[in-house]
Amino acid sequence: MVKWRIFRNFIVENQRVMNKIQPLDQVRSIVATALNQTTKVRKSFQNFFIETMLLILTIYGKLNFLSMARHGDSCESRFRQNFKKKFDWCAFNRNMLLGTSCHIAAVALDHSYLPKSGKKTPGLGYYWSGCAGATKRGLEILGFAQVVAGVSDARFIFAEQTLPQKSRGRTPFYLEHMKDKRDNQTAKCLRTIYDHKEQLLGISGILVGDCLFASYNFVTGAKAVGFDVVSRLRDDAVLHYLYTGPQKGGRGRKKELDGDVDIHNLRQHVFAEETLDVDGESVTLFSAAVKCKSLKRKIKAVIADFKCGAKTIRKILFSTDLSLEAAQIFLIYHSRFQIEFLFRDAKQNTGLDDWQSTDADRLSFGYNASLTAVNVARKIADEIQEQTGRRLSVASVKKVLHNASLYQHIKEFIEGQKSGNPQNKQILTDEIPPNLLFFGVRDSA
């Protein structure tokens, strides 16, 4: 009997908490708070932006201007006109960044392929698709996100589409080391980083990326801009020990190197060994300051032993900041993969692949809006977890918001808030009202 009372009280209390949850109001509050911290935003644009975030997180199916006009209160032309405007996504998303009280934060960057057909879309070309493992025709964006060492989460910052642009004028100082001064992929990344330098440095001075960014051109350019780089080297990378013995007197260059590094036969007196527990698995790290031939600089190399089934494999991580600890470098690179989940959630739930336009500015606004909506959904998930103890995915949050939107639409119909007379109460009958039955439905051509 006592157990039944405890269980019943738990159900009643949980129901009270659930009744207090107003997810649509939470979305409006989160977006409005972030907009208030973004300078030069008009009231009309604030209302439009809040409506856009709500529509992205409640609409199922293809997401475009026409579907948003069918489900929202604005016409299609209003979405087209406002998507053309410039917006500071960095300042907006900084309000939803992860806390870094006792951890090290980094800025993760990665490219994402977007499938696209047609002939008039700007930036259409052939790009590498990691899922397909091949080059495919479509679009590509470069995304930036905040990751925290040892935390399995990420927050989107901003994204830019890869567009063919001809560089004019003098070569920037951060590209002078490159032999190929054309606007290649590395040069475009460095230009984007330099354009948002102050905002990114306000988040972290560490850039983390996959093997694509472990090149001399990128690392040297990033260091010139003011960033350190954490990434992974190839398994056959050439590393040299640093000479620390006595130097000969007289003329000539001082001795700098002391032999090649064999990652399978390390010098125990040079490489420091430590064990790290990651997700319940033990990882052995060997770290030392060495010279990298391909990067042409001294780096902090971290050789990590992973257990892959019955085998043990070794990977070479590195940092251009020699003061970082081995565990910090490993955890920062381990958290880098969280940016991939941002792209996944945006493609599956917030319509990252759906935007259609022949204008580059409208496409850029749509890509950033879809990825920002993932930030808002994860923020809502955190608040729901605090209130109920349930941890929801982005897909589950969208389902909750969709249900709340549908309930709100029916509630407004019953209470007569849409009519001229608020006292005109509607009564639900067996005959479904047309505005509810055909809500969001599109006529055939």
Image (tube, helix red, strand yellow):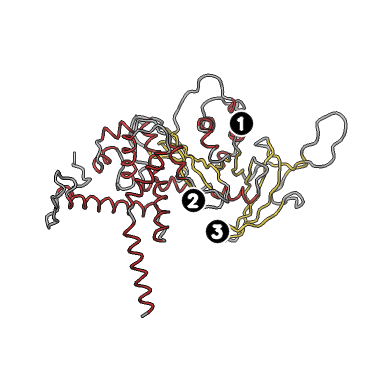
Question: How far is disc 3 from disc 1 in space, using C-alphas?
Answer: 36 Å
What residue is shown with label 3?
279
Which of the two discs, 3 and 2, labels the residue nearer the N terminus? Answer: 2
Image vertical order of residue 324 relative to residue 218, above or below: below
Quarter holding the N terminus is bottom left
What residue is shown with label 2?
153
The residue that appears at 61% across and 43% down in the rendered structure is 233
What kind of residue is marked 2? Asp
SS category of the residue bearing label 1: helix
Residue closest to the eye, 144 or 87: 87
What kind of residue is marked 3? Asp
Q: Given contact means CB atoms under 8 Å apart, are the residues at marks 3 and 2 in contact?
A: no
What residue is shown with label 1?
224
User: Where is residue 374 drawn, in percent x and y?
Assistant: 40, 46
Which of the two discs, 2 and 1, labels the residue nearer the N terminus? Answer: 2
Left or right of residue 373, residue 280 in this image: right
